[in-house]
Image (tube, rainbow, N blue to C red):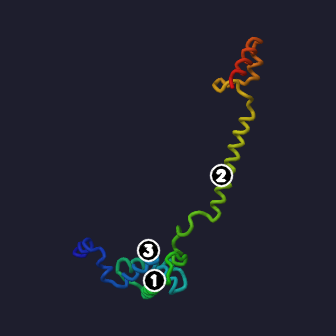
Amino acid sequence: MTGFFETLIRPDKEELDNMDRQEVGRAANILQVGEFQLLQLAYFEWHNQDLPDSLVHRLFYDYMIHNEVPHWARHYARQIIRLDEAGRIAGNDERYHRYDYDYGPKAPPHGIKKFFVAAGIVVLIFGGGVAGAIMSTGTAATQFPPYVSEKEMRAAATPDELIHLKTIRTAVP
């Protein structure tokens, strides 16, 4: 039970006591990846193959519970730290993010071009619809409802109303 309270008071105690684990954490921070992902990268570097699924659970358990750092992970972490101190490491290099499925550009390479093409099609459709609506109507007699065209007004108007309509039309600028 003492270990539980010590962990609550100093959660980093185990890591400070275990220098190998501290190096793995430091290397993971340099590469901006998680510690277990650094273990995966180290395994790939050492064995030239991805970490097999059969070893994932055991490696995770040994590393997280028993604080055991494999020799190949310790070597890889120290190599990353040395490269960083020499200024020869690029944390954004894709080879360090091979297990990050959400790493890299968020949009497809031609995303902007596709956006403008789609926006142009939408503008053409709506613009064509508005132009067609304007062209299909004649000149309105008034700008207020009911929207009745001059042609309809002439067809329904008496001769006296037509004279009055012409007078109004010439009076309005």
* Amino acid type indicated by mark 3: Gly
Q: Residue at x 55, y 85 (%)?
A: 48
Q: Secondary structure at mark 1?
A: helix
Q: CA distance from mark 3 to mark 2?
A: 40 Å
Q: Residues within 10 Å of mark 2 (few under 14, many from 20)?
A: few
Q: Secondary structure at mark 3?
A: loop
Q: Position of residue 136 (x, y in %)?
A: 75, 33
Give the number of the mark in front: 3 or 2.
Answer: 2
* Amino acid type indicated by mark 1: Asp
In this picture, is 85 found above or below 131?
below
Q: Residues within 10 Å of mark 3 (few under 14, many from 20)?
A: some
Earlier in the chain: of badge 1 and badge 2, it is 1
Mark 1 lies on residue:
84
Mark 3 lies on residue:
34
Earlier in the chain: of badge 1 and badge 3, it is 3
* Amino acid type indicated by mark 2: Ala
* Foreground of the two, 28 or 143: 143
Q: Position of residue 35 (x, y in %)?
A: 42, 76
Q: Position of residue 105 (x, y in %)?
A: 57, 67
Mark 2 lies on residue:
119
